[in-house]
Amino acid sequence: MPLTKIASSQELQQRLTDLLTYVTGPRRPSRQRIARELRGLATGLLSSRIARPVTAAMSESEFWKIIEPYRWGRGNTNYKEIEKDLMRKLTPKEADALQSAFAKLKGQADRALGDYFEEQGEWVGGDSWDDFLSHIIGMGKQEYEADLKDKDRALARFRKGDYRESFAYALPTSHSYERLDLGKYIKWAQKEVNAYREILGASEDDIPWKNKLAPDLKKLVDILDDFIRTKDFGAFLDKEDEAKRAAQDVEQVLRRLSGSGLDGSLGEAVDFARNKWGVWNLFTDVRQYLG
């Protein structure tokens, strides 16, 4: 099934009918092949007019011109920095056009290499297959076309694990630009501080080891409150290490309360604060998208 754009609901219905006929037919395709067909349908939907607003088409030459300077796989596999730089250079609509061009190239590579790899005994239905396809695109036009032309060359790369996770993460979508909104992180910090403040105000009867937790809880409340009040993300990032240590210490103590029977807002706060990753990921994303 070709991984082409789906232009109408009628075409979608026909593609689904074809897929059902194929899967239930006498040849009984492998699960790997079924997975590839489903990915093809998903790719078509992602670039379709019925799944998303129409964006201006981006030519392959424009796509290569944008991504090749990053030299993916040749000294650079920092997808976070690439994404951040692309968001500086592209508008949200241009980012969606970039994604559509990427999906088209990935579909071409899947069709060109997938069956051959399966014939050679390789599994091509998992994350590693997607990472591999994304990687050869990220390396640029010359490498991409060379791998599609010489399947044994591509197969050797795949078997050696000569690819990285994942160039796909480096390409923003129009929704990625929401991460540039400071207000998003202020709301996030508010949720975190509400949980820590709820626990700080609890009694020792409700929260054993509450007194042990108090210094770390106060530290987290102060750091998060300062960020909410001043909106100074630079000063906030300066306190990253101490905030992460405090969140980790709180997590370790609160995990002892598992199954303690706390309910209501305090129980919700404990469940929330029991996971340090709320605070850790807040700092990571603020540094990535605002720092």
Image (cartoon, rainbow, N blue to C red):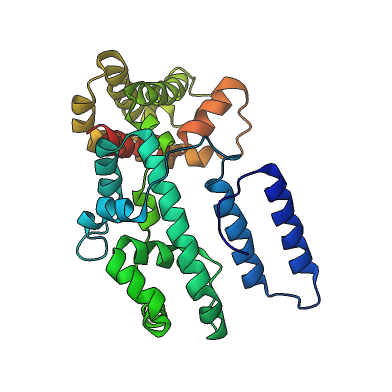
Which image quadrant: the C terminus?
Answer: top left
The image quadrant of residue 222 is top left
The image quadrant of residue 106 is bottom left
Q: Position of residue 173 (x, y in %)?
A: 41, 40
Q: Residue at x 33, y 75 (%)?
A: 146
Q: Residue at x 32, y 30 (%)?
A: 180
Identify the residue at the far top of this view: 229
Q: Position of residue 20 (x, y in %)?
A: 77, 61
Q: Is residue 161 above or below residue 128?
A: below
Who is closer to the viewer here, 204 or 224? 224
Number of numbered labels in the structure image: 0
| Residue 164 seen from this side | no
Q: Position of residue 172 (x, y in %)?
A: 37, 43
Q: Is residue 15 above or below residue 248?
A: below
Who is closer to the viewer here, 35 or 232? 35
Which image quadrant: the N terminus?
Answer: bottom right
Who is closer to the viewer here, 50 or 186? 50
Q: Residue at x 56, y 59 (%)?
A: 3
Q: Residue at x 53, y 66 (%)?
A: 126
Q: Position of residue 2 (x, y in %)?
A: 59, 63
Q: Is residue 218 above or below residue 152?
A: above
Residue 200 horizontal side relative to residue 236, left or right? right
| Residue 233 seen from this side | yes
